[in-house]
Image (tube, helix red, strand yellow):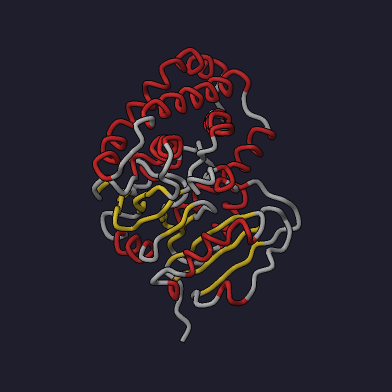
Amino acid sequence: MTVAPVMSAVLATDNLRTARRTLDCLRAQTIRDRLEIVLVSISGEPLGIAADDLAGFAAHVLVEPATPLSLPFGRAAGIRAAQAPLVFVAETHAFPHPEMAERLLAAIRPPWTTAVPGFCNANPDGAVSWSNLISDYGPWLAALPSGERPTCPPYNTVFPRSFAIEELERDENAFAPGYNLVAGLRAGGHRIFGERAARLDHANVSLRRTWLGQRFVTGRSQAAVRLTGWTRYRRAVYALGSPLLPFVFLGRCARPLAAARRVHRIPWLTAPALVAGVVAVAAGELTAYVAGGSREVHETADEFELHKVAYTTTHDA
């Protein structure tokens, strides 16, 4: 008897090699037979999926358009193709533990409609890696206790598919970094639960020669998405206030850093690396407020997102 999937895992990639480890982790889920896998080729080329790669899933969908897509648009195409009532947007550098989907599904119960896993460090041996994980995913670290969260990332999170579709109708960039997805959740009465027992290993840029450049591009790309529709006056106000951004960012990192230190042996250079990283992000945001974004900036940000494992050091990988 065919079992209807309860959750769709959407994974956008340029080729199968890039997505292999994440796909293997999804296939190892304890509730694989209740999951739908949606694979999206953003290169526009066939992924060359073998039957064994899809074995055991409740259902699968291949989205292989004739033309290339940006990473956010690829995720949007995957969400639209999904059929399950819940959707999880996976990443090519984030590796779910076998029980992650099962525990996230168990967390989706009143009053919670959205659930975030506990983030662990997939390459934990360097200060740069830890600083990037804490800066990007600090509020959802597995080192923090489970409970309600005020925000959630646009990926590696379980959303109701109906909500995801509504947001995409408003803006095709709804699942791009920088888009204010949480505003839509709050407006719809959705509440977010962070489940530390549902764990996911996240790889982080740690190559020093690319680290600060990646931080800058990330800040500019995300800010460019966020300021769509802003007036010149509002952009000017934010540009003038941008020197305060590092202090805002560091304030958000204080509790996650302290929690991580209680659980892990964090390199002592992590705090200085955090400072340098948030300054680079703030510089990227300032550039966006003044000059906007560009296709090249977004494509570079997509490159870092798709192939983040390639920007880890051999020691960390």
Front-most of residues 182 and 92: 92
- The image shows residue 17, relative to residue 234, as above or below, that is below
Q: Residue at x 47, y 66 (%)?
A: 84
Give x and y (percent) for residue 79: 54, 57
- The image shows residue 146, relative to residue 214, as above or below, that is below
- 41 lies left or right of 212: right
- The image shows residue 224, relative to residue 116, as above or below, that is above
- The image shows residue 82, relative to residue 196, as above or below, that is below
Give x and y (percent) for residue 125: 42, 43
Residue occupying the far right of the picture? 66
Front-most of residues 126 and 96: 126
Q: Residue at x 67, y 30 (%)?
A: 294
Residue occupying the far front of the picture? 315
Residue occupying the far top of the picture? 240
Q: In this view of the protein, can residue 106 be seen by the observer?
A: yes
Q: Quadrant of residue 230?
A: top right
Q: In this view of the protein, can residue 183 be seen by the observer?
A: no
**Number of numbered callouts drawn:** 0
Give x and y (percent) for residue 62: 63, 66
Q: Residue at x 48, y 53 (%)?
A: 94
Give x and y (percent) for residue 152: 39, 44
